[in-house]
Amino acid sequence: AFICELSNHIALENASTLAVSELILKGSSPSDIIIGIGPCIGSCCYNIDQDRANLLKNKFSNFTGFLEQREGKIFLNLSALAKQQLLELKILPENIEDCGICTSDESDRFYSFRKGDKGGRFAGIIGFKF
């Protein structure tokens, strides 16, 4: 089994799917891959402009539900986008766990660029079980 904690921002660049795709190419079965989606800015706080939304709609035209409209604003759901990318690779839904922590809401515990933090970083964990 492959166990991975993903940073959601890499979902925007398809890095999460590239890493998982590489594992599948190397012989891992998608049903054996377990994914943990770590803390990230949540759709509750990740407001984006129309140009960015249009860019994402074009880039991920086969996905839905990762853009939310509320109060005349557009919000990006990074976790939903990452999950859809992983499901497309046949990762089992029950093998994808999202911690559901918004770094902007919990900026006292986590680095949040949108809250003005400039130097924080997150670490990811990748493990193999043979």
Image (tube, rainbow, N blue to C red):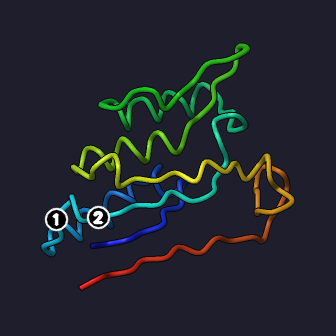
Answer whether labels 2 and 1 touch (C-beta < 8 Å): yes
Q: Secondary structure at mark 2?
A: strand
Packing grade of label 2 (10 A; few <14, some 14-19, many >=20) is many
Out of 118 and 126, give the one closest to the viewer.
126
Q: Secondary structure at mark 1?
A: loop
The percent coordinates of residue 112 (x first, y second) are 76, 57
Residue type at mark 2 is: Ile
Residue with the mark numbered 1:
29
Residue with the mark numbered 2:
33
Count of number-bearing discs: 2
Q: Quadrant of residue 27?
A: bottom left
Q: Is residue 128 above or below residue 8?
A: below
The percent coordinates of residue 81 (x first, y second) are 44, 41
* Most distant residue in the top direction: 72
Out of 87 and 63, give the one closest to the viewer.
87
Q: Is residue 102 above or below residue 123?
A: above
- Identify the residue at horizontal 39%, vertical 59% (top origin): 16
